[in-house]
Amino acid sequence: MLEEFSITLFVIALLGAVCMVAMVLFRQTLLYATRNAVAEMEGRVAKTRASFDGAVKAHEQNQARTRDLEEERRMIQNQLAEAQRRLLAAQADNFELIHEVGEAGAGRRLYTGSLSLGATLTVNQTATTHSHLRGCPHQVEVWAENQAEALRLARQAFPETAGFTLSMLQTQDAPAPQLVAS
C-alpha cells in the first residue's frame, strides 16, 4: 500500500507541477500580450497627440492670421473712410483732379485734356456703377514728344474699355523744362 500511495502522490505532484508550469506560461503570455497592447496604445496616443498638437498649432496660426486680416480690414476701412472724407471735402471745395502721365524731359511737351467716367467704370476688373469720383472734374496732363504719343499714353493709362472717356489732347505753349547738369 505504501507503493500505491507513493505512486499516487508522485502522480499528484507531477500533475501539480505541470499545472504550475502551465499557469506560469499562461501568466507570461498574458504579460507579454498586455505589454504589447500597452506599447501599441502608447504609439497611438503619441500619434494622436502629435496630430492634436499640429491641429492646435494650425488653429493658432489661423487665429493669428484672422486677427491680422481683421486689423488690415479695419485699416483699409479707415483709409477708405479718409479717402471718402477727402473726396467730399474736395467736391465741396470744387477741386479738380489732375491725372499726370509721363515725365517732363528734354524734347517733351505738355498736352492736356479732360477725362470723364463712363456709365460703368472698371477698376481692377471690378465694375463700379456709382462713384463719388463722378462729381469732380478730371484733367489729364501728358508729357510726350508729340500729340500722337500723348494720345497713345493717355489711352493706355485710361482705356475706354475700363469706362473712361478721353477728350482731344491740346498742346500747351511751354515745352518741357530742359534739365541742366551741374
Image (cartoon, rainbow, N blue to C red):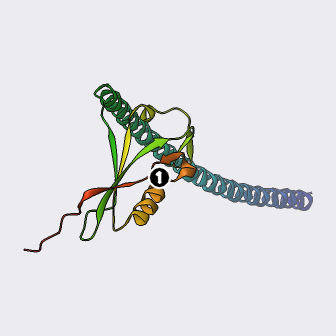
Mark 1 burial class by Cα count in 10 Å: few <14, some 14-19, many 20+? many
Indicate the position of residue 93 as horizontal and vertical percent values: 28, 27
Indicate the position of residue 163 as horizontal and vertical percent values: 54, 45
Q: Residue furthest top?
A: 92
Residue drawn at x 43%, y 45% is 115
**Amino acid marked by disc 1:** Phe
Q: Which structural element holds mark 1?
A: loop
> Which residue corresponds to mark 1?
158
Quarter of the image where the N terminus is located? bottom right
In depth, the one of 156 and 75 nearer the eye is 156
Q: Residue furthest front?
A: 173
In depth, the one of 29 and 133 nearer the eye is 133
Residue drawn at x 25%, y 57% is 173
Left or right: residue 41 compared with residue 86? right
Left or right: residue 142 compared with residue 120? left
Name above or below for residue 130 compared with residue 55: above
Q: Residue furthest left?
A: 182
Left or right: residue 23 compared with residue 135? right
Name above or below for residue 146 compared with residue 50: below
In depth, the one of 64 and 31 nearer the eye is 64
Indicate the position of residue 96 as horizontal and vertical percent values: 32, 38
